[in-house]
Amino acid sequence: MQDSRKHVEKVAATTDTRREVASGFRDGIPIAMGYFAVAFSLGIIAKKAGLTAPLGFLCSFFTRASAGEYGVYTLVAVQAAYVEVVAMSLVANLRYMLMSAALSQKIAPGTPWYHRMLMACCITDEVFGISVNHKGYCPPAYTYAAALVSTFCWASGCAAGIIAGGLLPSAIVSALSVALYGMFLAIIMPPSHSDRNVLYAVMASFILSGVCAVAPVVSDWSTGTRTILLTVAISSLAAWLKPIKDDADGEA
């Protein structure tokens, strides 16, 4: 009797896992389609940095961060030091630590530690969004499935962009490389329109980047070093002067 009950529970658990995998794939497909288009433009940048299609695929498969990868490929193109590349990746992807902490609240108690670590490694902005909005606790199978299909298309898009960058005329490659900058503008414009503090931070970043490019001493620093220092300085100052208020108690 006990063996029969265990068998039923095992079958039910397997069925639930399959259902969550199917649900994760279903929700991940729209993300994957968007990822391919964005990663294609990123591949154009990677081609200029000297990456091959297989290398670009591997880099994108294990990184999955548009801003982080763009920063790294830009630094690679100018032969920046390894410490600058590491620092850029840390600054650009630091938000994923906060997302991992938030997602941990959606994981069922008793979930093994290795599942928690792997789910954290699967996080992108979009996968995090659908995972935290999952009804009830978010099972690992759901996040894994959504991350797998979206990551494959992200990496494939980057590889396709690298291949296209080697086949298309230089004029078209230059035009396509602008698409990624358009994506970044699409990211910053909506919050800048709705939040004046974000607008001030964006304006400060544009102005100070231009000033630092021509200022004595600072202009001699590498592009990566200036970008890292400005990112940390502007974001820290904005957080100190205009902290986000907690809606629950009105405190910072």
Image (cartoon, grey):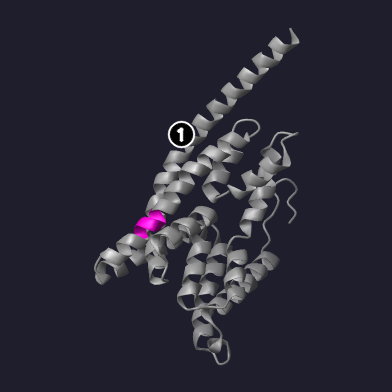
Say which quadrant the C terminus sits in: bottom right
Task: Name the quadrant containing residue 178.
Answer: bottom left
Would residue 157 be found to the left or right of residue 123 on screen?
left
Would residue 117 be found to the left or right of residue 69 on screen?
right
Task: Name the quadrant containing residue 233.
Answer: bottom right
- Say which residue appears at 49% left-offset and 73% top-offset: 76
> Camera-side residue: 150 or 6?
6
**Where is residue 11 drawn, in percent x and y?**
61, 18
* Label 1 CA crowd tier, 10 Å (few <14, some 14–19, many 20+): some
Q: Is residue 181 above or below residue 119?
A: below
At mark 1, the secondary structure is helix
As drawn, the residue found furthest toward the bottom would be 216
Would you name the residue on which mark 1 appears? 26
- Say which residue appears at 69% left-offset and 54% top-offset: 245
Q: What range of the chain is rendered magenta?
A: 157-161
Q: Amino acid at mark 1?
A: Arg
Say which quadrant the N terminus sits in: top right
